[in-house]
């Protein structure tokens, strides 16, 4: 059964006559009769009673007529949506961002939506990376920028960029030198890290050095502002990107040292749920987010490497 057969069936049902139905459908009467016969063979039941004065629908024909009209209307609506739906971006979209993502592209994203997509209602949620992932998994947001998400069958995670992690603290605590520092040496320092669990995954791609650092941490925080305050106060040091501490770095309140043996990297992913179909709005916002990130990295505002 296909849409053409359904259209032919409807023509016969409404005209009650093969000749008139053939004229309406612009098809040969023999071809029309052949398609009706194929439908009846497929359903294993007569759809019409052939009478001297025309075609009388059976009970099965009556039921098929109701379904056929609904099916053809739905197909026509689908065709219109596919052809015309992408011409105007409208509706609601909710996006979750780890703090670094919001800091880098939050304002450009809001500005672009307000100027370019007046019929789009944007909702932005900023949180630690682990909390952002939870918002996505509970369907509170449609798209999420998350660091190092776990491998989940329900999650589609697209790598966007990679960032190098540094040892960050006051010069008095980690030394004024710009020389590299080994992971083992970092582990001996008074470390302040993000709260253990999903949020801690945002620090590193590799869980082995992460566990080493967590074992020696003197404090775990669940606040970016609290982290910056603790670092500038000299209460401890941490592992972070230069982007995360850009303001206190420029002010000379903090310094960074490259971590080696091993070099520490983390990856930012743009995530969505596998069971949620991609809409025109989601598709456009995904494109916009990736473009804004590329722009920030390209002009040097975000010290990172775009993922190939």
Image: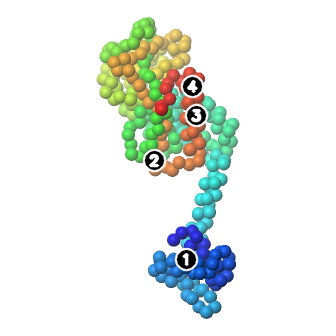
Q: To which residue does mark 2 refer?
A: 274
Q: Are marks 4 and 3 in contact (CB under 8 Å)?
A: no
Q: How far apart are labels 3 and 2 at the CA level? A: 22 Å
Q: Are marks 3 and 2 in contact (CB under 8 Å)?
A: no
Residue at 31% x, 27% y is 208
- Secondary structure beneath disc 4? helix
Q: Indicate the quadrant where residue 188 lies.
A: top left
- Secondary structure beneath disc 2? loop
Say whether residue 115 is left or right of residue 31.
right
Q: How far apart are labels 4 and 1 at the CA level? A: 60 Å
| Discs 3/2, front | 3
Please rate how many residues cluster around mark 1, counting C-alpha atoms within 10 Å: few if below 14, some from 14 to 19, many from 20: some
Residue at 47% x, 12% y is 255
With respect to residue 293, does 174 lie above or below? above
Q: To which residue does mark 3 refer?
A: 291
- The disc label shown at residue 35, or none: 1
- The disc label shown at residue 298, or none: 4
Ranked by sequence position, the earlier of labels 4 and 3 is 3
Instruction: Give whichever of 65, 98 is nearer the camera.
Output: 65
Instruction: Give whichever of 76, 227 is nearer the camera.
Output: 76
- Secondary structure beneath disc 3? helix
Question: Where is residue 103 drawn, in percent x and y?
Answer: 55, 27
| Discs 2/4, front | 4
| Discs 3/1, front | 1
Ranked by sequence position, the earlier of labels 3 and 1 is 1
Q: How far apart are labels 3 and 1 at the CA level? A: 51 Å
- The disc label shown at residue 306, or none: none
Say whether residue 136 is left or right of residue 54.
left
The answer, for residue 165, to whether it is visible in the render is: yes
Please rate how many residues cluster around mark 3, counting C-alpha atoms within 10 Å: few if below 14, some from 14 to 19, many from 20: few
């Amino acid at each position: 059964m296909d849409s053409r057969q359904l259209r032919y069936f409807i023509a016969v049902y409404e005209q009650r006559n093969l000749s008139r139905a053939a004229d309406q459908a612009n098809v040969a009467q023999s071809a029309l009769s052949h398609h009706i016969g194929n439908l009846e063979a497929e359903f294993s039941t007569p759809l019409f009673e052939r009478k001297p004065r025309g075609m009388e629908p059976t009970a099965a024909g009556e039921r098929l007529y109701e379904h056929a009209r609904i099916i053809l209307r739905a197909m026509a609506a689908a065709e219109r949506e596919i052809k015309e739906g992408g011409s105007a971006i409208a509706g609601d979209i909710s996006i979750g961002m780890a703090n670094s993502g919001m800091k880098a592209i939050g304002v450009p994203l809001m500005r672009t939506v307000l100027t370019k997509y007046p019929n789009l209602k944007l909702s932005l949620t900023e949180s630690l990376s682990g909390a952002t992932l939870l918002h996505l998994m509970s369907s509170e947001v449609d798209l999420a920028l998350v660091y190092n998400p776990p491998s989940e069958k329900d999650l589609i995670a697209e790598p966007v960029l990679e960032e190098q992690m540094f040892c960050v603290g006051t010069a008095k605590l980690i030394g004024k030198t710009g020389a590299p520092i080994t992971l083992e040496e970092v582990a001996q320092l008074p470390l302040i890290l993000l709260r253990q669990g999903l949020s801690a995954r945002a620090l590193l791609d590799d869980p082995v050095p992460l566990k080493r650092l967590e074992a020696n941490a003197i404090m775990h925080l669940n606040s970016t502002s609290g982290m910056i305050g603790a670092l500038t106060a000299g209460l401890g040091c941490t592992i972070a990107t230069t982007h995360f501490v850009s303001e206190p770095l420029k002010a000379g309140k903090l310094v960074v040292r490259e971590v080696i043996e091993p070099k520490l990297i983390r990856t930012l992913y743009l995530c969505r749920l596998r069971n949620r179909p991609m809409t025109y709005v989601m598709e456009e916002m995904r494109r916009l987010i990736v473009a804004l990130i590329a722009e920030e990295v390209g002009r040097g505002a975000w010290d990172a490497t775009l993922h190939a």
